[in-house]
Every structure is written in structure tokens, then in C-alpha cells.
Image (spheres, grey):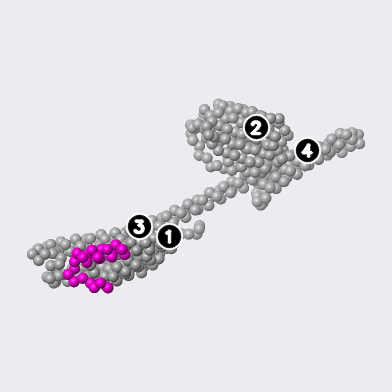
Amino acid sequence: MTGQTFDADWARPRPDPEQLRRDVLLAGALALGTALSLTLYTIGEVYERPAPWWASVSFVVFSTAPLAFRRRSPLLVAVIIAAAFMLGMIARVPELLFGSINLFVAIYSAGAWARHRGRAMLVRGGIILAMFLWLFLDLGIRFANPELLDELIPGDAPIQSAVALSLINVLINLLYFGAAYFFGDRAWASARDRAELEHRNAELAEQRAALAEQAVVLERIRIARELHDVVAHHVAVMGVQAGAARRVLRADPDGAERSLVAVEASARQAVDELQRMLGTLRSGPLEQPASAPSTEGLERLPELVDEAGSSGRSISFSSIGDPRPTPATVASALYRVAQEAITNSLKHAGRDTTIDVRLRFLDETIELEVTDTGGRPDEPAQGSNLGLVGMRERMAAVGGTLHTGTRARGGFVVRAAVPVGGTT
């Protein structure tokens, strides 16, 4: 799609089945209208010596039936209907209304749907030129033959009346053919503009998707770096504990056993952290940015709340349930979710908003909830939603879930939950 251009060589796409079906219906409706008009003009005796019935029937067929293909073969349709119109007028077919409508639709369609613009211009120009030559020839013959001139004006009318009516006839034809030509070109240009707009919208959608994917990748990189630091901490602790066990192995077997038990626990937890890190990086090798590692945990949530409250906002923190040991990766992820949620509330809610941070230690999950009461900020901030993407990625990396949305009574809520089974 990115290679598509919209220059003068752009070709309008082929009509779809629904458009072709509508063309058939249009041709049928115009055929009925032309037949009705022909019948009424025949009864009204518009011509003293009208064309024979077979010529009138042929005129109805050839001036309407081709319109069923006006989008599929617009130039051929325009030529056929123009020829039928001229032959019908020369043969004095008693129909003076729908024939002009059919020709207008044909010329319009040639301008709106012809895929080759040069041919469209030549065909329409040729039809219009032929029509005016025929018009001037007819007027010349009438002015040269007084009997034919009487059909245009009464015999006692001055010649100026015939000239004036002829000029009006020329002006009407100029407006008629000019409108068909102009509106056909405008329809083609509008279709081109719509296609270009759809193309640009598709490109923007692709760019937005690429940016969102890039944001996910960058967030995974950052998460992986933090997981790396946590795992490195576990390995370092294991080394210290193993060294201590080695030194006291003979003098204090019980102490050595306790150290080895601690090493075993740290090893199990390190394996869990490594599994989470590999899951985060499973999409492929990525370059790691030079950013500082994160060792923030749940114990720093009160400090985070106090820091946010120093700006004058009303913010509270509460912990519900019995605290339990939490893996550093889970604690860090929950801390970063709380940090991002509080930051969003400070940016997007009013100064009078109340922010409530709750940490719940439930039977099956550890849950963090950050809510605010909403309001209009002094200076509205434009959000990119990348913060929400980062929070979801952090929860996914530790096997948790994230819910965000507006509250029924106003404000916004961010709720993160990590199963107990995913934290051991």
C-alpha cells in the first residue's frame, strides 16, 4: 500500500457488484421513463410526420440499455447513446425529454468512470463537438428554408426572433454539455480524493500500530532489564549464603544447614524470575537501553504516596490483609503500576481530586488499586496511552492482569492483580 501514488495516472477502481446492480436498475427506470415520454409526445403529435414505431422502439432501447454498463465501459456507452440520440432526432422520434437525460448521464459517466483520462477527454470532446456541429447545421438549414424556419417561429415573426431563439438554444446546449463534462470530472476527482484519504488513513493506522508495537517492545526491554537486576541480586545472595555455609560447615552444622536451605529457596525463586524474564524476551533478541535498574518494591508505596501528596493533592494509602513475602519482580511491577497510575491522576484529574491507593493481600491474589474522583485539570494534558500499554506489559510479565476505566460515580480506576500462585 505504501507504494501507491495518486498522480494523473491514477485509475479509478472497477465498480463493485452492488454498483453494477444499481446501474441495471437505473437503466430500467430510464427506459420506462423514456417509453412513457415517447408515448405522451406521440399522443400530443409533437411531429406531423414522426418516425415509424420500430425506430421509436430502437431509440428507447439504444438510448437506455447501454446505461446498465455505464461504469464498466463508460466511453463505449457514451458513444452508443450519443449516436442513438442524434439518429433519433434526425428520424424525428417524438421524444424530447428523457433522451437528453440519458445523454447527460452517459457523458457524466464517461468523465466519472473512464480509467484513461486522455481517452475520456477525447471521447467527450468529440461527442460535444459533433452535437454542436449538428446543431449549427440544423440551424443553417432552417434559416435557408423558410418552411423549416416556420417550425422554429411563426411566419409573421421578425427574423430577430429566430436569431434570439437560436442563441438561446446554443446557450442551453453549452450549459447542458458543460455541466455533464464538469460534474463528471468532479466525480472522478472526488473518487480520487477519497481513495487518497483512505490510503493515508490506512498508512496512519499502520504507523499507529507500529508505534504501539514499538512501545511494547521498549517496555519489554525495560522490564527485562529490571528482571535481570533482580535475578542478579538473587544469585549474589546465593553466593554469600553458600560461602557462609562453607565456612561454618564443620564448626556449626546447623548454621550451615540453614544457609543451604536459604540458598535452595533463593535458587528456586531465581529460577522463577528467569522463567518470567525469558517469557518477556521470547519475541526475539533486543538491544537493551542504558537505563538504571529498578529495585522499587511494595515497601516504598507509602513513600511514593507521601511524595505525590507533597504537591498539595489529597492522596491516601491503605494496606488491607496480612502482608506476605512477594517476589521482587512482582513487587517492582506493582510499584511501577502505582507510580504510573498516580502520575496519570495528577496529570489528567483536577486539583480537587482525591486519589486513593489500596494494596490488598487477598487469599488468592495480591491486588493494587488506584482510584481518583476525576475533575477537570487546569491545563489538560494530551495522553498517548503508552503508559497504559506499559502497565499491561508489566502485569503480563509477572502473570497478572490489569483493569483500567472510568468509574460510574466519576473518576478513573486502575486495578492490578497478581495471583498468589504466580508469586511463589
Q: Secondary structure at mark 4?
A: helix
Q: Amino acid at mark 2?
A: Leu
Q: Earlier in the sequence, mark 4 or mark 2?
A: 4
Q: Which residue is mark 1?
A: 18
Q: Which residue is mark 2?
A: 359
Per the model, the C-alpha gap separating discs 3 and 2 is 63 Å
Q: Amino acid at mark 4?
A: Val
Q: Is residue 204 above or below residue 306?
A: below
Pointer 4 residue: 237
Question: In the image shown, does 368 or 70 lie closer to the viewer?
Answer: 70
> Badge 1, how many Cα within 10 Å: few under 14, some, many 20+?
few
Q: Is residue 53 covered in magenta?
A: yes
Image: magenta residue range: 31-54
Element type where label 3 sits in the image:
helix
Q: Amino acid at mark 1?
A: Glu
For the residue pair 199 and 396, the one nearer the viewer reads as 396
Residue type, label 3: Arg
110 relative to 249, above or below: below
Pointer 3 and pointer 4: residues touching (CB < 8 Å)?
no
Residue hosting label 3? 186
Left or right of 16 in this view: 207:
right
> Which x, y percent locates residue 165?
16, 62
